[in-house]
Amino acid sequence: NKAAEITKYAKEEVMGRNLVDGFIRQQYKAAVKRVLANGLRGEETSNFEFPLFTKDQERVDILLNCASRRAAKGKIVGVVGVGQDITERKKVESELERVALDLRMLIDTANAPIFGIDSNGNVNEWNNKAAEITGFDKMEVLNHNLVEEFIHSDYKPMVKHVLENALQGKETANFEFP
């Protein structure tokens, strides 16, 4: 059975034991008790994340969906929880967050101006060097139209053309303007 595989406990070791008292760490007991109590009142819980610790004290991240268990006439007689081991997914998410932070730092501290625009031409990225060169702080330019508000009228058509091409996936190498 999957629960035994995840927790490394045999079915005989867990049957009849209190889930919260026996298998949940102190800092998560109140939250898990709340989910179970809600189930006993007929309130379902979806996508509740909590750590479960195996027999070997290894942390396993669980995504739990909890529903009331009902007798034939509809009376609530317990709670049914369907859990999914999301430990690997959480590790991947954590690594992605780390990489995103590294990239954010790389962009912010680059020795070249870096900016980004959305499909409407509004600024959605502006690094420290762009702020230093232009004198416009990131918060001053975000969500403002780059070409219309920050490019000199003499260069608007050229810059707009280059940016429109970029938005269509056409690269322009080394475009320079004063």
Image (cartoon, helix red, strand yellow):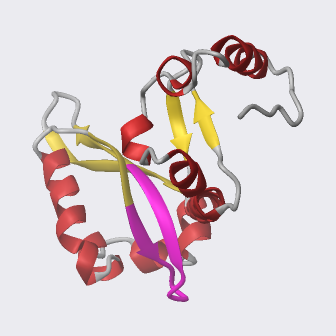
Whether 88 is drawn above or below 58: the answer is: above
Report if residue 1 is visible in the image: no
User: Residue 152's x, y, as percent?
Assistant: 57, 23
Q: How many marks?
A: 0
Please say whether residue 61 is one of the residues in the magenta stretch.
yes
Q: Residue furthest bottom?
A: 56
The answer to whether 139 appears left or right of 31 in the picture is right
Residue at 67% across, 15% down = 160
Nearer to me, 165 or 31? 165
The answer, for residue 139, to whether it is visible in the render is: yes
x and y, in percent, of residue 43 in the image = 17, 39
Q: Is residue 132 above or below residue 50?
A: above
Q: Is residue 59 above or below residue 119?
A: below
Q: Is residue 1 left or right of residue 169?
A: left
Is 153 covered by the magenta stretch? Answer: no
Instruction: Identify the image quadrant of residue 46.
Output: top left
Quarter of the image for the N terminus: give it.
bottom right
Closest to the observer: 4 or 103?
103
Q: Main secondary structure of the magenta part?
A: strand
* Percent position of residue 17, x then y: 30, 76
| Residue depicted at 71% across the width and 34% down the height | 178
Q: Position of residue 63 (x, y in %)?
A: 44, 53
Q: Residue at x 57, y 25 (%)?
A: 151
Q: Which residues are magenta?
A: 50-64
Query: For the point 25% across and 78% down, which residue is it?
Result: 27
